[in-house]
Every structure is written in C-alpha cells, then in structure tokens.
C-alpha cells in the first residue's frame, strides 16, 4: 500500500507510543496498522517494546510493510553497550531487524567516535536497516556523519507550529537527513493557537490535523502519540487535508519558539 512519504522515503505519518504501555499499546499499534499506518515509533526507554511488537504481530499487515523505529537510551551508548542493547530491543520487539535505530539523545555515554561505529556494526549485520539520531543539533549530526559509513537517514526532534526548527530543517534537507517531528501536535497545545483555529475552520478540520498537514507539506514526518481509535483515525485523516500557500505561510509566520521537552541533559 502506498502512503505519503517525506525525505528518504519515510512514511509521513507514524504512531508515537510514549506513555502507551501494555495491552493498550498493543491495541493502539494494531488499530493504527489496520487503518493504514506504516510507521511505528517506540524506544527502549518507553518500556513498551514487547507490547508494540505484539501489536505488529497481531495486525494483519505484513511485517515488511512497516517502518519500525526504536531508540537506544543514553546509558547504552558506549562502544561495548550498543550491540547488546540493540539486540535486547529486537528480542523485546520480537523482530529480526528494525528499520530505524535512533540514538535517543546525544548525552550520557554517547561519544560519536564510539557509538556510531557500533551502530554501523548492527547495520552491516543487517540487524538495523537504517541508522538515525534524535535530539541532535546540526553540528552533532555533522560529527555523527563523520563517524558513520552508513548514512544517517533521520534526525527526530521536537517540531510543531510552535517550534518550527527552521535552521535544523534547512541543515537536514541539505544533508539528505529526514526530519521526524516528535510532539508534532505540541501535546495538544496546538488547539489553543488562534491562527491554527482559523485555518482549521476554513477546511472544516481540527487544529491537530492542520498541524500534521503543515508538517507533511513541509517534508517533515510526524509521529503523534494517539491511544484511542478516534485519535488514531483523526490523525490519519490529516493526510487528506492539503493546505494552500496562504495557510502554509500563515503557519510559517508563527514565531513562538515554545519548546516542551527540555531536560537538563539536552544539547541546546
Ligand atoms: N525522541 C525523543 O526524545 C522523543 C521525545 C518525546 C516524544 N517522542 C515520540 O514522539 C511521540 C509523540 O510525542 P508526544 O507523545 O510527546 O506528544 P504529541 O504526539 O504531540 O501529543 C500526544 C497527546 O495528544 C493527544 N492526541 C493525539 N491525537 C489527538 C487528536 N487527534 N486530538 C486530540 N488530542 C490528540 C494524545 O492523547 P491520547 O493518547 O489520549 O490519544 C496525547 O495526550 C511520542 O509518543 C514518542 O513516540 C520522542
């Protein structure tokens, strides 16, 4: 099945799963896949890889059609820790390989010269189809590239109409690194932005759908976390919404720089 894609062929819409655990996570993943999603985002840190893997297994969608992404936590990034940590993620997911393996944060035991070669070992063995990073600044992406023979296909960062990441998006575009937006609906805050409400009203859509359409049309993949079928479906349907140039410009002009995820170990 063809789904809209962004740079590097990544499906434009994926399902986020942070804080969705156990049977509910299994159910949400299965529901999403059966509605048409082909991109599922998890992480060792979310403690739901087994439940996510069970959802993939329970769905009627063949494994090879799905982009499955997981992430290594920052205390598993020393040269000797990466391979066993990734294998443990694969075991929990019940998969032979993942499509994207992210370095979750450039923090803790992350050291480009150690971590990236270890990720390349996994890539060479076929356990990881693509190497990716998350929460990296442009400078950190460049350094990681210097230490990776395998291309870095994506940088997953917070990105939504209230934090547009123009500079980072430009850099990633110039380097053929896809941008994957986490918290793409600003954890619901997009509903309170009058400019987004105006565009939503014009298209008989929601502010959430407008935000997801804006990201897609700006060539950014989005992985909104949604638990219920209603939210999973509403987000999927954002792909039927096409914003016109005036709508896109109105959103581009928002200048709010509201970052929601800002732990002490962040690199910025
Ligand atoms: N790489 C990183 O460091 C990092 C950091 C944060 C997040 N992430 C990833 O990005 C994903 C998304 O980010 P996020 O979970 O922080 O925030 P988000 O996707 O912006 O927002 C999730 C919230 O929005 C609600 N929601 C979803 N669809 C909705 C809809 N159509 N209408 C109204 N509300 C809706 C969800 O509720 P329900 O759950 O009730 O549906 C949930 O409360 C995460 O799950 C995770 O996979 C990665």
Image (spheres, helix red, strand yellow):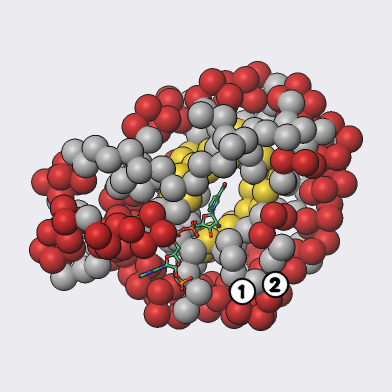
Specify whether 245 is left or right of 180: left
Q: Considering only vertical position in the picture, is 168 above or below 204?
A: above
- As helix, strand or loop, the secondary structure at mark 1 comes to helix
Q: CA gap, disc 1 to disc 2? A: 6 Å
* Residue sitting at x 19%, y 38%: 253
Q: Mark 1 — residue?
A: 25
x and y, in percent, of residue 52 in the image: 66, 69
Specify whether 224 is left or right of 198: right
x and y, in percent, of residue 207 in the image: 25, 62
| Closer to the camera in the image, 42 or 94 | 42
| Closer to the camera in the image, 12 or 202 | 202
x and y, in percent, of residue 109 in the image: 77, 33
Asked if marks 1 and 2 touch (Cβ < 8 Å), the reply is: yes
- As helix, strand or loop, the secondary structure at mark 2 comes to helix
Q: Mark 2 — residue?
A: 51
* Residue sitting at x 72%, y 46%: 72
């Amino acid at each position: 099945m063809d789904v809209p894609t962004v740079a590097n062929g990544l499906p434009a819409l994926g399902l986020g799963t942070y804080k969705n655990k156990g049977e509910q996570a299994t159910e949400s993943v299965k529901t999403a896949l059966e509605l048409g999603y082909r991109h599922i985002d998890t992480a060792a840190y979310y403690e739901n890889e087994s439940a996510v893997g069970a959802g993939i297994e329970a769905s009627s969608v063949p494994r090879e059609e799905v982009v499955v992404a997981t992430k290594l936590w920052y205390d598993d990034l020393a040269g000797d820790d990466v391979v066993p940590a990734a294998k443990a993620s694969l075991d929990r997911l019940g998969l032979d390989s993942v499509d994207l393996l992210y370095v979750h944060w450039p923090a803790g035991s992350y050291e480009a010269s150690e971590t990236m070669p270890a990720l390349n070992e996994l890539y060479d063995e076929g356990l990881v189809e693509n190497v990716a990073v998350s929460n990296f600044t442009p400078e950190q992406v460049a350094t990681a590239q210097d230490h990776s023979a395998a291309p870095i296909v994506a940088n997953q960062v917070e990105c939504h109409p209230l934090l547009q990441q123009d500079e980072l998006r430009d850099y990633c575009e110039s380097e053929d690194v896809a941008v994957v937006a986490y918290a793409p609906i600003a954890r619901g805050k997009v509903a309170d932005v009058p400019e987004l409400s105006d565009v939503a009203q014009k298209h008989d859509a929601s502010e959430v759908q407008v935000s997801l359409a804006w990201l897609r049309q700006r060539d950014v993949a989005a992985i909104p976390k949604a638990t219920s079928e209603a939210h999973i479906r509403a987000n999927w349907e954002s792909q039927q919404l096409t914003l016109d140039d005036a709508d896109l410009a109105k959103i581009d002009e928002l200048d709010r720089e509201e970052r929601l995820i800002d732990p002490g170990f962040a690199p910025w």
